[in-house]
Amino acid sequence: MVKLVLGIQWGDEGKAKVVDYFASGVDYVVRFQGGANAGHTVIVDGKKFVFHLVPSGILHPKTSVVIGNGLVIDIEAFISELGELAAGLPVDGRVFVSNRAHVVLPYHKLMDGAKEESSSKKIGTTRRGIGPAYIDKADRVGIRVGDLYQPGLKEKIEHAFEVKRHLLDDYYCIKDLPSVDEMTDTLYKQAETIRDYVTDTELLLQNAYRDGKSIVMEGGQGSLLDADFGTYPFVTSSNTTASGMFAGSGIGYIPDLRIIGIAKAYITRVGEGPFPTEETGAVGEDIRRLGKEYGATTGRPRRCGWFDAVIGRYSVGINGLHEIFLTKLDVLDEQDTIKVCTAYELDGKLTDYPPSTTEEMYRIKPVYTEVPGWKSKTFGLKKYSDLPANARSYIEFLEMQLGRRISYISTGFEREDVVIR
Ligand code: IMP
């Protein structure tokens, strides 16, 4: 069976822990979109691992990991991550990189940063060059991993960089630009370091599926950051929803695909953009402190707020979710009462569906149902019957709101801190 696990809010739903949980004994864990903008933290036996590009399944010694064609890869970051992993884990023969994935070049990062610095309408990107690399892909001037092994790389970079050089220099006034020769030489060298990992990953996955191997597909970011269905333009530049898996992995149609949505028991967002249930006061600070809500990639404090069932239901639909994995329930252990947004009020009218425009999203007033907190420790609990009655009521209320079963509940950092229902 192939499992697809993806975040159904604005990212940081605890995907790495969930993937790590499902990856045990699995043959392949696959990423299919995004790049080093993702930050995945996994804690095993008290040791913290942070991944940006390599799927977190690498921590299971019998699992191979695949970086699919849908990613934009910062090769330098990839090599450094591999180096850190290789210090404690065998990586050779377990890591596969698509020759069709695109490469993030130094000027993509410069463009990302320069645009963020100078724009009056900031997105709050991670500045990892993700958007500019996907722009080159769509513009058909991108450099793909396979190109690094062919002559003519320099001409390709020259062609892609032509206009951006002027933009960076003349418009953004960035003078210290990398030369095409420098970029070409560095990439040719890096290409040799990663040569053994590069392959036709779509074929590898098609064969693995045909041979009955188990596969976990790991979505990056979250559904509300999807380029089509997210809170555009405050989104990332890839399809983070279920459809992105097909385009970004090439595995083909899978009749027995199981799609598991990961939702935090509350919500966070990093970067700019609408967030109807955001709590900017003491409650938000409390959640941030207790949930350690700081970005794994940028260290930025995350914006925190209450669970939003409107976007939850929306995510169920756009992803075709089968079930839900609820994370960080224990962070709410101290709350007297807990709010759940069950509908939106927009310009005096009630709606249970998110509007398509940012302007409308900013005008939303959340309609809340308040439920009593449980005021006791759920941290580390592993049996549903051991959860306090009010915690169970909260979970069952969310289930009713989302129309999907919450089959798993995470109650702590460690791999084993999971309640299975
Ligand atoms: P970009 O992906 O760096 O272009 O950033 C676009 C938006 O997506 C910004 O709001 C980022 O904060 C957000 N974003 C990107 N990656 C992540 C992630 O892994 N977790 C949460 N938010 C993310």
Image (cartoon, rainbow, N blue to C red):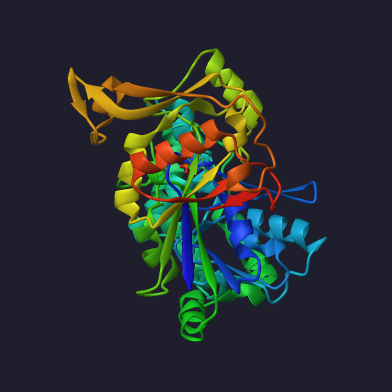
* Residue 229 pos. (x, y %): 30, 45
Using the rendered image of the protein, determine whether residue 95 is visible from the camera's viewpoint. yes
* Residue 108 pos. (x, y %): 49, 47
Q: Residue at x 37, y 55 (%)?
A: 321
Q: Residue pushed farthest top?
A: 281
Tell which of 4 and 403 is nearer to you. 403
* Residue 201 pos. (x, y %): 51, 75
Tell which of 26 and 143 is nearer to you. 26
Q: Residue at x 44, y 26 (%)?
A: 118
* Residue 146 pos. (x, y %): 51, 72
Q: Residue at x 39, y 29 (%)?
A: 273
Q: Name the quadrant containing residue 19.
A: bottom right
Q: Residue pushed farthest right?
A: 87
Q: Is residue 30 above or below residue 42?
A: below
Q: Is residue 2 above or below residue 170?
A: below
Q: Is residue 196 above or below residue 334?
A: below
Q: Name the quadrant containing residue 301.
A: top right
Using the rendered image of the protein, determine whether residue 230 is visible from the camera's viewpoint. no
Count every numbered label the image shows and give the total.
Answer: 0
Please indicate whether residue 83 sits to the left or right of residue 183 in the image.
Answer: right
Tell which of 62 and 256 is nearer to you. 256
Q: Residue at x 50, y 46 (%)?
A: 129
